[in-house]
Amino acid sequence: METLGAGLGLLTLLLTVGGCARTGSLAPVGPSVVVDFYARYAGPINDGFHYFIPIDADGDYGADGPVPVAAGPYWQNGWGTGSFTHYIEYSQGQYTVYQTVRQPLLQVAGGGLTAVSGTVSGSVPGTSTLTVQTLSFGVVAVSGTGMIGSAANASFQSAGTIALQTDAAGQTVAGSVVYTPASAGGRALTAAEQASIDTLNGGGVALQADSLAALGLSLTLGAPQASTQTLTIAPTTATVRNLFTPGPGIVGGGSDTSGTLIANAVNDAANTVLTGASLTVADFVAGGSATVSLTFSPNAIPLGRPFAYTLPTIGTGATLQATIDLAMLGDSIPNLSVNFISVTELIFDPNITDPAMHCYDGLGRLGNRYQTFPTNQFQTITNASSSFEQEGANDPTLQGTVSQLQKNQVDLVDWSITIRNLR
């Protein structure tokens, strides 16, 4: 039977002689500080299953950390939730290090927000409530010489142009009044708005200060005269508040920020309200709110292989060992929180809401414990020396319609974490 001592000895040998050790071919020096992970299971590693080592590098010293997704309906990445910034995955005969990203899902449309897509950085799943606050209607610029001296916008939210002509009597010229929506910030007119334009476009209508009132525009007019003029309406913007609430059981990580969005536009990933997500907005509704859930995306960012690793012996090997360069997780990281989560399958079906319908394991009897440690104190933390109950076999999370062998293959029974200095 493989033992912890044997596993650590093998890892030490691996790093000494090379083995699968990986260092960047262009890097002038190797890592300064590394973290070794060791996990042993009750049965041999199954390459068709998924073995994760989620790592929370947000520096909150264990205020929250990575835990399994025990029940739906929001399965996120199919296996893990809580707070974590990175993870190592072993599956299909290889290890890969990933950086987490969150995917936005529009749960409740409102305030004019109609669709969300893209990815959002961050290590905490939860809910963003986006509330429309102050609106700034697009300024109207008047070009050409004629009756219209200026125009004001009280409520029109579609950017674009209105071209019109008047005759010497100050009446509209038939066929000359045309609204063209802008490619960015513009939309088709409503029936009432179009009817107003159509009336003017019929010709012979005396231009009045309220001729475009159906669009929310008012005109300042001079003496009647023949003219050709264009009103150019800039995009409408709004200040939108983003109140982020972390998911259940997560301590900290909330925020209250605000930014600017454009009406009748797809606000791309560079927007300042929910950076990374594309937010589709129609006309804003002042005071209205939309609810966006942020869950871990299964499409995390791959960072490459660990610095060093040992592949389990096919069919018999029950241990996983990997070493990462601490710098791979970012700069100036004061502490890490780590869990070991293994699953027989990734679950995305929202109809599966009973934890007994799937088979998984993690630190602690329920898998919901994680080990936190400082990065400036070089040490080895083992199953026996951890701050919570010792990991053993046959945890109650090992359920689902799988065989006993398959349960054993994800049943974590021993582990260790070592943080050490290489130079």
Image (spheres, helix red, strand yellow):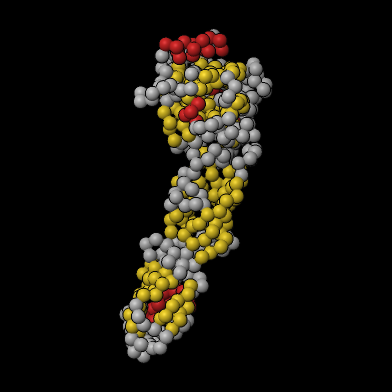
Nearer to me, 125 or 354? 125
**Residue 68, can we see it?**
no
The location of residue 159, given as percent across then percent down, is 42, 66
The location of residue 390, given as percent across then percent down, is 65, 19
The location of residue 331, given as percent across then percent down, is 51, 32
Nearer to me, 219 or 145? 145
Nearer to me, 118 or 345? 118
Q: Residue at x 39, y 71 (%)?
A: 232
* Residue furthest to the bottom: 169
For the image, the number of numbered tags is 0
Report whether 183 appears left or right of 116: left
**Residue 223, can we see it?**
yes
Residue 12 sits above or below residue 232 on the image: above
Q: Residue at x 45, y 81 (%)?
A: 220
Q: Residue at x 44, y 50 (%)?
A: 270
Q: Residue at x 59, y 33 (%)?
A: 59
The location of residue 73, given as percent across then percent down, is 57, 41
Report whether 246 appears left or right of 34: right
Name the quarter where the N terminus is drawn.
Answer: top right
Residue 366 sits above or below residue 251 on the image: above
